[in-house]
Image: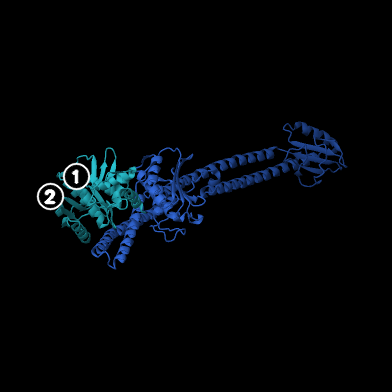
């Protein structure tokens, strides 16, 4: 079971993070104090760290910098009540891997953390093809086949499917998808992502075929290889 | 933002200043005083000279009348020829006024005979000449006159000095007045410039205070103290706002998490599920609204033009159309792009994208099925113009300004979901860029234009 270090001074938030991550199958260790968190982060092996930006004693930014200077590349997800672009950029520049602004939905946190872990596990080897069950995607020829049937995808649909395939079995929230495909970080409102996802699903999962893309209620979408 | 009209230094404006009016008044009073003084001098001197002349006339008349009647014409001729300066007048007339001799040819009828000396009038006499008529014991009339020519000389001198000194007083006084009022006017211009900077958002600007410590300085000092207080209060309000926002974030996160966990922990068919899902939905829309507010504050806080880069508008619009085309199609609406050539602009691409995306989302939301949404890029003389037009119900002319305000929900669509903050975000982005934002009638429908050139912002 992957061990996660949660450095968070607000007890209620910490409890939510711990219970959410525990439910997602992680072994979570919580520290409330920045200095203690820093000591743990540099001395013990963790799969990932969630780090509050503002902490007593040692500031979150300082912790990231010190951990990175110590040559430790454990994925760090920063959680902050400071939502400015500047703050985000600072956090990422200091060595954070992702930045989540409060208020956030707990599913968003676990989804992002899992993506970070997955990115960490995946060797940087360049894949030329992605598969999930009877779905095959050739990244070079841009051919997509499901059960041998060729699918005609528009560029956006292709990128959407690629994102889902690269993170198959993984919940992706709407804002993660919007960020990854369109590169913007604002709240697009409406049902923008749902509409795009709906188009992809109509092509990918025609009626009568076990669906690959699943809606995770309240959270987002996930692609599970057909069983 | 309001702008203060600049003080012009024209004469009309100058005349309105207290200093100038006072100086002009002083000059006028001074000129009147000088006139009175010179007039008095003239009157006194003229009186004295007249008395002297009268004595000379009376003496001459007496001397002439004493001699024998027969030699009088000869004596008169002699006196005339001895008068080298030609200041004397003589005339001898018969009893019934016929000229006998002398350089006065016509008997001045206006002189009372045997009366006191009077002024001699007529073309032959210098102004100020005086004379008298006297009946001699044998009946003839003797006229003696005198003109020292000093009186007219004196009058000329007085008039000249009045003109010169009056002119001098006028010129010196008025230029002094102008100089005295230009100084304060210039300082008021400085005050206006500083005020305009403050209105434009530079809260660090202060009114200029000189070392003189006069009334303007004291007023400026008071205004500066007030300004410092306003800045302090603004800072307090802002920090209260930030703290409120900051303090709300954590509890909102907790609330969302608790509701989510509650929803996860009950069965699929639990009768409480719909209620919990509704609560979760409400919390999510609360969070969305909260984030939108934070977003507006964040955009407003941004350094103007920091992070601006050259943005090509055509690819931006194509990206937007590609993003929203499926949404439009699903809603049975047509999204059309109309792109004309336009130069790139200096802007924050992400914010521009966000603003336009809000406009398109709004258009899609408010336009009924079968509607038409048009995205237009055109080039005008001032710069490129971006337009989003829909065929929906539009916004009444009297509401168009108000919808740019935070939380304003148009009458046109009661019950439509949304934070009511979409247009406020657009307005914040326009404000940051100093772009114009105008709402108009697309006949039917709403047309929102973003004019991508700097204008004085008004919302």
Callout 2 secondary element: loop
Callout 1 secondary element: loop
Q: Is residue B31 left or right of residue B213?
A: right
Please rate how many residues cluster around mark 2, counting C-alpha atoms within 10 Å: few if below 14, some from 14 to 19, many from 20: few
Circle nearer the N terminus (1, 2): 2
Q: Marks 1 and 2: same chain? A: yes
Residue B431's x, y, as percent?
41, 48
- Which residue: 66% across, 38% down? B156
Q: Residue furthest right?
A: B96
Q: Real-space Cα distance between discs 1 and 2?
A: 18 Å
Chain at numbered mark 2: A
Q: Judge whether A90 appears above or below B88 on screen.
A: below
Chain A: colour as depicted:
cyan
Chain B: colour as depicted:
blue
Q: Which residue is mark 1?
A: A122
Between B452 and B243, the one nearer to me in the picture? B452
Residue A144 falls in image quadrant: top left
Can residue A176 be seen in this snapshot? yes
Residue A170's x, y, as percent?
23, 51
Q: Is residue B207 left or right of residue A22?
A: right
Residue B111 falls in image quadrant: top right
Q: Which mark is residue A34?
A: none
Residue B41's x, y, as percent?
63, 45
Q: Is residue A90 left or right of residue B19?
A: left
Between B168 and B326, the one nearer to me in the picture? B326
Between B363 and B410, the one nearer to me in the picture? B363
Q: Which residue is mark 2?
A: A45
Between label 1 and label 2, give the one nearer the viewer: 1
Residue A188's x, y, as percent?
35, 51
Residue B80 falls in image quadrant: top right
Can residue B211 be seen in this snapshot? no
């Amino acid at each position: 079971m992957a061990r996660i270090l949660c450095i968070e001074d607000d007890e209620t938030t910490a409890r939510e993070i711990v219970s959410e991550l525990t439910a997602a199958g992680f072994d979570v260790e919580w520290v409330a104090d920045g200095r203690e968190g820093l000591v743990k982060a540099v001395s013990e092996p963790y799969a990932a760290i969630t780090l509050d930006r503002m902490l007593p004693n040692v500031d979150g930014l300082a912790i990231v910098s010190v951990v990175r200077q110590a040559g430790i590349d454990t994925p760090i997800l920063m959680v902050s009540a400071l939502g400015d672009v500047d703050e985000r950029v600072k956090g990422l520049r200091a060595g954070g891997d992702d930045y989540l602004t409060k208020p956030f939905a707990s599913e968003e946190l676990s989804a992002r953390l899992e993506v970070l872990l997955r990115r960490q596990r995946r060797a940087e080897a360049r894949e030329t093809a992605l598969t999930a069950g009877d779905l095959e995607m050739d990244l070079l020829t841009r051919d997509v086949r499901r059960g041998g049937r060729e699918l005609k995808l528009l560029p956006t649909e292709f990128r959407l499917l690629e994102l889902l395939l690269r993170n198959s079995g993984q919940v992706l929230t709407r804002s993660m998808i919007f960020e990854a495909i369109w590169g913007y970080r604002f709240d697009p409102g409406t049902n923008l992502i749902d509409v795009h996802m709906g188009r992809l699903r109509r092509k990918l999962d025609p009626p009568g075929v076990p669906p690959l893309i699943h809606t995770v209620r309240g959270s987002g979408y996930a692609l599970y290889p057909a069983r | 933002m309001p702008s203060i009209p600049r003080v012009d230094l024209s004469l009309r404006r100058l005349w309105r200043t207290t200093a100038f009016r006072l100086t002009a008044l002083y000059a006028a009073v001074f000129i009147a005083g000088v006139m009175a003084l010179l007039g008095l001098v003239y009157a006194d001197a003229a009186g004295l000279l007249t008395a002297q002349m009268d004595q000379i006339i009376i003496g001459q008349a007496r001397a002439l009348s004493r001699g024998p009647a027969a030699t009088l014409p000869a004596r008169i001729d002699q006196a005339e020829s001895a008068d080298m300066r030609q200041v004397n007048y003589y005339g001898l007339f018969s009893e019934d006024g016929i000229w006998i001799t002398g350089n006065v040819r016509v008997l001045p009828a206006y002189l009372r005979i045997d009366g006191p000396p009077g002024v001699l009038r007529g073309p032959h006499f210098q102004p100020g000449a005086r004379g008298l008529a006297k009946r001699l014991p044998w009946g003839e009339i003797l006229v003696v006159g005198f003109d020292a020519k000093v009186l007219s000389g004196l009058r000329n001198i007085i008039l000249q000095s009045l003109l010169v000194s009056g002119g001098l007083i006028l010129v010196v006084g008025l230029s002094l007045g102008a100089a005295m009022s230009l100084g304060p006017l210039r300082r008021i211009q400085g005050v206006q410039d500083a005020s305009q900077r403050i209105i434009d958002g530079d809260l660090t600007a202060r009114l200029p205070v000189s070392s003189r410590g006069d009334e303007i300085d004291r007023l400026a000092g008071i205004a500066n103290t007030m300004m410092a207080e306003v800045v302090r209060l603004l800072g307090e309000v802002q920090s209260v706002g930030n703290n409120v926002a900051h303090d709300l974030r954590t509890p909102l996160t907790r609330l969302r998490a608790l509701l989510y966990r509650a929803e996860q922990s009950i069965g699929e068919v639990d009768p409480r599920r719909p209620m919990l899902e509704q609560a979760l939905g409400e919390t999510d829309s609360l969070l969305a609204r909260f984030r939108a507010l934070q977003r507006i504050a964040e955009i407003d806080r941004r350094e103007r033009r920091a992070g601006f880069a050259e943005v090509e508008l055509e690819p931006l619009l194509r990206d937007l159309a590609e993003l929203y085309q499926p949404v439009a199609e699903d809603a049975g609406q047509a999204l059309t792009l109309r792109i004309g050539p336009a130069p790139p602009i200096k802007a924050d691409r992400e914010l521009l994208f966000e603003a336009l995306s809000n406009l398109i989302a709004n258009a899609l939301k408010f336009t009924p099925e079968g509607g038409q949404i048009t995205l237009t890029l055109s080039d005008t003389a001032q710069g490129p113009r971006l337009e989003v037009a829909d065929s929906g119900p539009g916004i009444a002319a009297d509401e168009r300004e108000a919808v740019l305000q935070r939380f304003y929900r148009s009458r046109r669509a009661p019950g439509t979901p949304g934070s009511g903050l979409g247009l406020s975000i657009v307005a914040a982005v326009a404000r940051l860029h100093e772009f114009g934002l105008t709402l108009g009638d697309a006949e039917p429908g709403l047309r929102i234009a973003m004019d991508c050139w700097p204008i004085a912002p008004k919302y």
